[in-house]
């Protein structure tokens, strides 16, 4: 398999950009506004990954990964969630990450699958990160007859780190705030987008990829998104409370980060213990395993590729 390396990332920017330009991009209209999508499925792809990214993220952030997948003859479909990236924002204040109900994420995902995946392939699976993992779990819990072959989840948001407050207290405060009409306001401690220095970041140990991420958001101000609303917080905490309540019918593989301060990694093993087809592997990295240092990132992608090949059809062109 072909893997990108941080030491040659800058030298490969021209090729990465050329691949990005070759992808099909557009918008689909939903009840939650225009949703940006990207699709690149080679005629004889090994299989196709539906990349479901995390909070504040965008397809633009994954240019390096999209280029790698193309080099490995793997199809990909991805999109920006409602309220972030190049999709329509849900509030007049673009800096507040907001959602009314978590099922809104699922409803957009269902449209992406219907319009950008199923017309082009029946040999596909999920690749999801963080909040994307929670959205995929929600979808799978409500769609036992899905045609997805499996789901690879990177640091899925199965439990949120609400420190210094316990989860029950954070959920109670968010619920009260929503009932008082503050659902669309920043939750306590949340603020507009800030570009933190690498030395102070909680996302990755790779300085090259971190600086690329920050430069991207500095170049495209439209991508910038701050903290979450009380509404988002309550919806997310209500959703994660349901994580272990349903059996998922398809195989799942989880990459968990040992030094994750964004989500609670212990929830990954608890979830896996209740599933019949779920495997967890832990890596000595931070939250963004798909943007980590080369050794960790390559091991995570190798886990993803091995899992994908084990659950998808072996013949090409399917």
Image (spheres, rainbow, N blue to C red):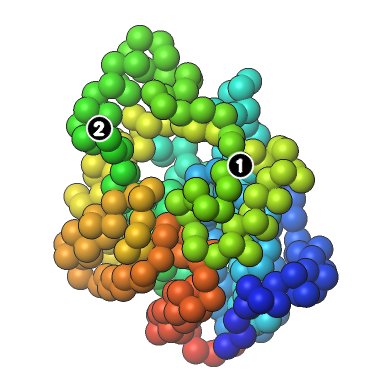
**Counting other residues with Cα less than 10 Å from the Cα at mark 1, is it few (<14), some (14-19), or many (20 or more)?**
few
Image point (32%, 44%), residue name:
160
Is 318 located above or below residue 169 in the figure?
Answer: below
Q: Is residue 176 visible from the viewing direction of this image?
A: yes
**Residue designated by label 1:** 195
Does residue 77 appear to the left or right of 286 in the view shown?
right
Can you give x and y, in whole percent of width and height, for residue 49 in the image?
54, 69
Does residue 29 appear to the left or right of 311 in the view shown?
right
Can you give x and y, in whole percent of width and height, for residue 226 in the image?
55, 33
Can you give x and y, in whole percent of width and height, for residue 56 in the image?
55, 43
Dot 2 and dot 1 residues touching (CB under 8 Å): no
**Residue designated by label 2:** 165
Please tell me in which quadrant of the rendered image residue 8 appears.
bottom right
Image point (56%, 53%), residue name:
198
**Counting other residues with Cα less than 10 Å from the Cα at mark 2, is it few (<14), some (14-19), or many (20 or more)?**
few
Does residue 165 appear to the left or right of 111 in the view shown?
left
Closer to the camera in the image, 87 or 106: 87
């Amino acid at each position: 398999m072909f893997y990108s390396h941080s030491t040659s990332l800058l030298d490969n920017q021209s090729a990465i950009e050329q691949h990005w330009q070759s992808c099909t991009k557009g918008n689909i209209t939903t009840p939650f506004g225009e949703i940006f999508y990207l699709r690149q499925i080679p005629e004889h792809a090994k299989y196709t990954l539906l990349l479901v990214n995390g909070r504040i993220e965008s397809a633009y952030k994954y240019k390096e990964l999209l280029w790698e997948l193309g080099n490995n003859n793997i199809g990909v479909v991805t999109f920006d969630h409602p309220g972030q990236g190049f999709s329509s924002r849900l509030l007049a204040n673009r800096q507040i990450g907001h959602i009314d109900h978590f099922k809104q994420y699922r409803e957009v995902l269902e449209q992406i699958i219907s319009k950008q995946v199923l017309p082009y392939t029946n040999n596909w699976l999920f690749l999801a990160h963080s909040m994307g993992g929670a959205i995929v779990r929600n979808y799978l819990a409500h769609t036992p007859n899905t045609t997805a072959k499996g789901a690879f989840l990177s640091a899925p948001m199965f439990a949120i780190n609400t420190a210094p407050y316990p989860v029950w207290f954070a959920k109670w405060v968010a619920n009260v705030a929503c009932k008082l009409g503050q659902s669309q306001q920043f939750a306590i401690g949340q603020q507009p987008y800030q570009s933190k220095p690498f030395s102070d970041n909680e996302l990755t140990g790779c300085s090259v990829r971190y600086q690329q991420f920050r430069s991207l958001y500095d170049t495209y101000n439209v991508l910038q998104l701050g903290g979450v609303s009380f509404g988002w917080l309550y919806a997310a905490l209500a959703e994660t409370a349901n994580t272990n309540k349903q059996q998922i019918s398809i195989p799942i593989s989880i990459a968990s980060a040992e030094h994750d301060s964004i989500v609670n990694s212990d929830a990954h093993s608890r979830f896996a213990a209740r599933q019949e087809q779920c495997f967890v592997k832990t890596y000595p990295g931070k939250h963004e395993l798909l943007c980590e240092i080369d050794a960790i990132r390559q091991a995570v992608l190798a886990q993803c590729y091995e899992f994908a090949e084990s659950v998808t059809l072996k013949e090409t062109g399917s």
